Amino acid sequence: MSASANGVPRALLVVGALSGALAVAAGAFGAHALAASVSPERLATFRTGASYHLIHALATVAVALVAAHVPGRVVRAAGWLFVAGTVLFAGSLYLLVLLDVPMLGAVTPLGGVAFIAGWLALAYGALKG
């Protein structure tokens, strides 16, 4: 993973920023394109995915910035757990709504576990750092 001169993990920062852009686009898509074509329950599911996506995009960017000041791999691991959680949690909800495949809902809790692990890793890294 490359780092800039100030120690910010560049790859994590870029992924977090791009994830944020994608989260905003997904939210807009849900509000404008999906609103008339899916049930209110499915729209709520999509919005849940977009909300968690945006929150964890911001968390990923924050972790990249924190990693410049807190030594060790645990904080960086927290950022990558947030990325994995976003793919699994938000991604499965997006696909569940768009493809109407209820079985994808079984993947969502794995993303939730990755989010929780990321937050715990961040707390542990802060305590150790």
Image: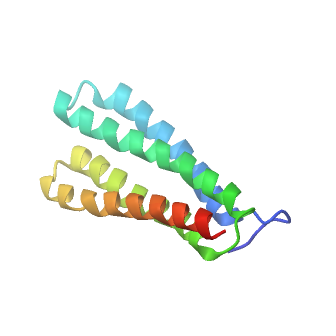
Residue 75 % position (x, y): 59, 66
Residue at far front of view: 127
Depth order, front residue of 44/7: 7
Q: How many marks?
A: 0
Position of 91 relative to 43 (above/below)? below
Position of 72 relative to 36 (above/below)? below
Residue at (40% x, 34% y) in the render: 29
Quarter in which the N terminus is drawn: bottom right
Residue at far left of view: 102
Residue 19 % position (x, y): 53, 50
Position of 5 relative to 98 (above/below)? below
Judging from the image, the colouring scheme is: rainbow
Residue 104 % position (x, y): 20, 58
Residue 126 % position (x, y): 61, 62
Q: Quadrant of residue 60?
A: bottom right
Depth order, front residue of 72/60: 72
